[in-house]
Amino acid sequence: MKRLLFASSFCLSMIYACGQEKPLDMKMDFEDYDPPSTLVVPEHHVTRAKFPFIDVHNHQFGMTSQNLSDLVAQMDKLNMAVMVNLSGRGRGSTDHLEKSLENVKKSFPKRFIIFTNVDFGGIDDPEWQSRMVKQLEDDVKKGANGLKIYKSLGMFNKDSKGDRIRIDDPRIDPIWEKCGQLGIPVLIHAADPKQFWQPIDKNNERWLELKTHPGRRHDNDPVSWETIIAEQHNIFKKHPKTKFINAHLGWYGSDLKKLGELMNQFPNMYTEIGAVIAELGRQPRAAREFLTKYQDRVMFGKDSWVPEEYQTYFRVLETADEYFPYHKRYHAFWRMYGLDLPDDVLKKIYYKNALKVIPNIDASQFPK
C-alpha cells in the first residue's frame, strides 16, 4: 500500500514538472478569490448621467473654506447639477453652518443646498425643545433647506441618565412638527443594514464586509434592528404633515415588497438610493417594477463623495448591461444588472422628485 501511494505521488509530481497540469492554489483565502468574468456581453461604462441630477445625500465637512471650483468641476463631469450637503452644522457649530452658507452664496449659489442638524445631547434640559425649535427657525432663515438626522439617534445618543434616546421620543415631537410647518424635509438615517445585527457566520450575507470592517458590527448591541426601525416608522405615522426622506431605501432594498407596503402606509415618506444601488442591481426586474410604481417617491443619493463610484449608479439605472461588478467587492460580492429605466422615470429619480420636496433648488438648471 505504501509503495502504491509513493508511486501515485511520484506520478503527479512528474505531471506537474512536465507542465501538463498545475497544482491548485490551496493557500488562497476566500477574500482573495475574485475571478474576472468570462461572459461576453455588451458593456456600457457610463461616466456621465444622461440627465442633470441632484444628489440628495452627500457630506462635505470642509465646505466652510474649501475652494468650491474644484468640487464643481468634478460635479460637471458627472452631470451633477446640485449637491445636497447634509452636514451643515459639522460638529454642531452655528459658525460652521453660517460659513458654509456664505461660501456657497458668494461662489456657486445654484449648485449647493445645505441641510442643518440637531444636537440631542441636552434633551433633558427643560429649555432644550424651545432652543432647538428656535435654532431650526433661525437656520432656515439663514438658508438651510432641510434637516438631516444621523443614525446616532436611536443607537448612540443618550440622555443624562445614560438611557438611549429613542427616535420617537416625545420630547423631539416639536422638531418634527416645526419642519412640517417650515416646509422643509427631514432626511433620516436610522440603524444600519439588518445583517450587521445578525451572527457573523457563514449564513451572514455581509460576512466579508463585517470581517474587513469589524467596527460596523452590531450583533452585541442591546437594542435590536427591529426596535430602531419601528421607532422611525412611528414618527412617520405621528407627523403626517412633515415630509421624511428615508435614507438608504430604509434598509429594505432587499425586500421591495415590504418597502412598497411602507410607501403605501406612509404617503409622507420618500426614499433615496444612497449606498444601496447594489440591492437594486441584483434584482433588475423587481427593482424596475418598484421604481416604476413609486417613481414619484424615490430620489438619487450616493452618501459618500467618491466621483468614480457614481458610474455604477448610472450603469444600473440607465443601461441594460448584464453581470457587471459593483465597485466595492466587500460591500457586494454579487454582480449587477442594468434596469434600463425609461427617461420619464429617470428624470424623476434624478431631479424632479427632489425639486418637489426640497425647497429653493433652482429648477432652471433642469429640462422640463
Image (cartoon, rainbow, N blue to C red):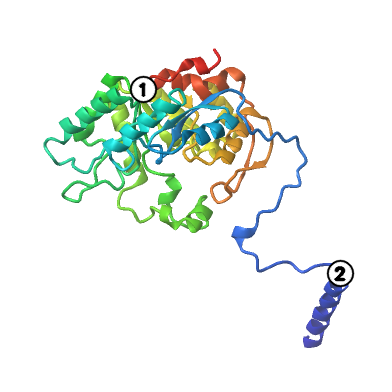
Q: How far apart are marks 2 and 1 (CA)?
A: 67 Å
At x 49% / y 58%, what residue is drawn? 211
Horizontally, residue 170 falls left or right of residue 126, namely right
At x 35% / y 23%, what residue is drawn? 243
Q: Which of marks 2 and 1 is nearer the N terminus?
A: 2
Give the quadrant of residue 319. Answer: top right
Q: Quadrant of the C terminus?
A: top right
Mark number for residue 187? Answer: none
Give the quadrant of residue 192. Answer: top left
Outermost left residue? 126
Q: Quadrant of the N terminus?
A: bottom right
Horizontally, residue 271 falls left or right of residue 178, namely right
Instruction: Identify the residue position indicated by label 2 in the image.
Output: 19
- Name above or below for residue 260 compared with residue 343: below
Give the quadrant of residue 47. Answer: top right
Horizontally, residue 140 falls left or right of residue 13, namely left
Residue 10 x %, y %: 83, 81
Residue closer to the observer: 226 or 1: 226
Question: Quick check: can you spot residue 347?
Answer: yes
Residue 168 x %, y %: 26, 35
Helix, strand or loop at mark 1 = loop
Residue closer to the observer: 18 or 266: 18
Helix, strand or loop at mark 2 = loop
At x 66% / y 54%, what residue is drawn? 34
Residue 17 x %, y %: 85, 74
- Disc 2 marks which amino acid? Gly
Question: Quick check: can you spot residue 296?
Answer: no
Mark number for residue 268? Answer: 1
Crowding at dot 1, Cα within 10 Å, few <14 / some 14-19 / many 20+, comes out as some
The answer to whether the residues at label 2 and label 1 have Cβ atoms under 8 Å apart is: no
- Name above or below for residue 45 compared with residue 177: below
- Disc 1 marks which amino acid? Asn
